[in-house]
Image: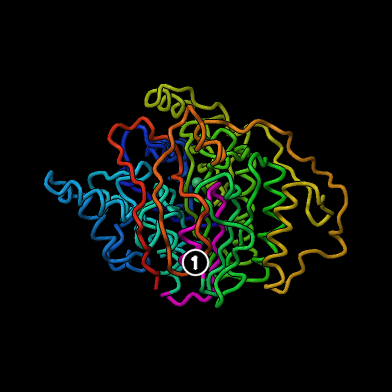
Amino acid sequence: MTCTLHVAWDERLAGYDFGPGHPMAPIRLKLTMELARAFGLFHLDGVSVEVPAAATRAELEFYHAPVYIDVVQLAGSGRLLGPDQQVLTERVLLMHGLGTEDDPVFPGMHEAAAMVTGATLAAARAVWTSAAHHGASIAGGLHHAMPGHASGFCVYNDPAIAIAWLLGQGAERIAYVDVDAHHGDGVERAFWDDPRVLTIGLHEHPGSLFPGTGYATDTGGAAAEGSAVNVALPALTGDAGWLRAFHAVVPPLLRRFRPQVLVSQHGCDSHRDDPLTNLELTIDAQRAAHAAIHRLAHDYADGRWLLTGGGGYEHVQVVPRSWTHLLFEAAGRPLDPGAATPGLWREYVSLVTSQAAPDTMTEGAPAEFASFDDGYNPADPVDQAIMATRKAVFPLHGLRATWPATEPIISRVKPPAPREPRTSMSAPLPALMSSSTTKPCTALTVTDSGRGPSSPASTLSVSAWAATRASSVRASSSGYTATPLR
Ligand SMILES: [Zn+2]
Ligand SMILES: [Zn+2]
């Protein structure tokens, strides 16, 4: 494929930094861009790497409540943190999801988060104006942020803001595909009742992972039934099951919907080594997913593709390789998975992390799957998840959940071998709460009364990682009512 790619990148994007020990460490971005640079991305024909401008306040207000932006600004400036205002400060911050273990306040938070959104907007602009076929914002994909509060390491919701901007430019059909292990609740909520935006998420089942939403039966508001699509995959789903689910759900819907722009969020925390989730993918399956999404952009969206990063908390072995594959895929020059990683990059990794870098760009997995259309196994938990989604939304798009070719048969895909779930940060929620080795994390109760999908049954933060953070603020219940979007 002949593709041109606009990469919105600046070292300042690494300023989005919640501090030492936080999983969302900016080193993951630095190692990614250094790996891409070492492979020569910045000098490829058709690739432009440009410094984005920060999002303006007016742009942030496409999605966020003005009062929330005020609080983020004040908190990051330190002006709310006077000793005589301590109690008020904590209450006000917690009302807006800030000062929590997941989203602690850091100096310059507003400016850093506005830069991330600015990068995604710059990439969106490049795509919409046809300056490039594809636009990449690796620092972006902060899909949990809500109109009036931070959530899950996300302060401003750059994908939602970029989609809102595209709609404002006159786009009439936008598809958003989110392959992060966590449900993209903030983006789904933004367009819950908007038939112009089709949001599709493949994520770990909400029963075992933050944010506790994203069931197959959540299909969009009354004005936009079928515009939200959720594939809730069981914990421990691996390459074959994940790819089978992706291909059973995403291509038929995009073929039908025909978006003018495809927006995708490439959180790579679905990897088997990610410390916060329970999916079991390899780099090779993630690379296959990047390639499949690229192909779909050309097949059904006239090549207009805006891609972002997202979650991903194994900073050395996973994120740099997964997203370097993504960037080269988007440049139309996919890397050979068997390629050795550049020696200079390995030295850099060793220097800044004291860890051994991976030697090659592959984990040697075949990334193969059996097509759902050749038959499915009603007893297989992945096939059950696929069927639940197809039954919930396919008829709303004039598609059949099953047809003669997909009569139940004993699948050629073996169910994943049973394994004990991990018990620390990545444990399923009930185990996480009862684990004697893991302190329960902040329970910030959010009572959203605005429209949107059903609230999560549980109010856990993304992780229990902050159990050792001495400075963390604990919240019991804020009683916060989120501001409706529009
Ligand atoms: Zn392309
Ligand atoms: Zn995630």
Residue 334 lies, in percent from the top left, at: 59, 45
Can the viewer see residue 1? no
Q: Is residue 220 left or right of residue 467?
A: right
Mark 1 highlights which residue?
Answer: 452
Q: Residue at x 63, y 67 (%)?
A: 300
Residue 261 lies, in percent from the top left, at: 53, 67
SS at mark 1 in the image: loop
In the image, residue 412 above or below residue 166 = above
Residue 160 lies, in percent from the top left, at: 44, 63
Residue 429 lies, in percent from the top left, at: 54, 41
Q: Nearer the viewer, residue 123 or 190?
A: 190
Q: Which residues are magenta?
A: 168-192
In the image, residue 295 above or below residue 40 = below
Q: Is residue 91 left or right of residue 134?
A: left
Residue 284 highlighted magenta (yes or no): no
Q: Residue at x 29, y 50 (%)?
A: 112
Q: Nearer the viewer, residue 439 or 30?
A: 439
Q: Is residue 457 left or right of residue 14?
A: right
Q: How is the image coloured?
A: rainbow
In the image, residue 49 above or below residue 57 = above
Which amino acid, mark 1?
Gly
In which quadrant will I find the C terminus? bottom left
